[in-house]
Image (spheres, rainbow, N blue to C red):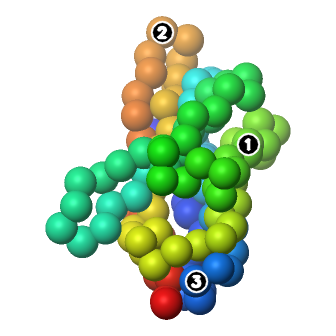
Amino acid sequence: QVQLVESGGGLVQAGGSLRLSCAASGTIFSINAMGWYRQAPGKQRELVADIISGSSTKYGDSVKGRFTISRDNAKNTVYLQMNSLKPEDTAVYYCNARVRSRPSYENTYWGQGTQVTVSS
């Protein structure tokens, strides 16, 4: 089993910054990818950013140029630096990880979510 623990959410004014962290622990052989998704009230969950085991990244269109995803493989931790935050970034942010607990078995795990609120 794998656990994802998120931290770093909170309340910030528009134009401000926040940094989210997500640490994976448990039975981990390798982590193929880690990322962040978000879900605002009444909306579907959407991709914010994703980083695969090398350094290839993918961003949602609405956050390109403002958010940066990074990963510390030694710590099994992914970070999301969020700059120039806008009220429309307000959502619950969920960490996601595709983890191999053994060479032939991959599963997808989710964190519990952390609230990010951007005031205007």
**Which label's residue is closer to the chain start, 2 or 1?**
1
Spatial CA span between label 2 and label 3: 45 Å
Is residue 56 shown above or below 70? above
Question: Which residue appears at 64% of the width and 33% of the height?
Answer: 57
Given the current orientation, which residue lies at the most extreme top position? 104
Image quadrant in which you'd find residue 70: top right
Q: Which residue is mark 2?
A: 104
Q: Give me the disc on residue 39.
A: none
Q: 2 or 46: which is nearer to us?
A: 46
Q: Which residue is mark 1?
A: 71
**Which label's residue is closer to the chain start, 2 or 3?**
3
Q: Residues within 10 Å of mark 3 (few under 14, many from 20)?
A: some
Spatial CA span between label 1 and label 3: 26 Å
Q: Residues within 10 Å of mark 1 (few under 14, many from 20)?
A: many
Q: From the viewer's perspective, is the residue at label 2 or at label 1 nearer?
A: 1
| Element at label 1 | strand
Callouts 2 and 3 close, C-beta under 8 Å: no
| Element at label 3 | loop
Callouts 2 and 1 close, C-beta under 8 Å: no
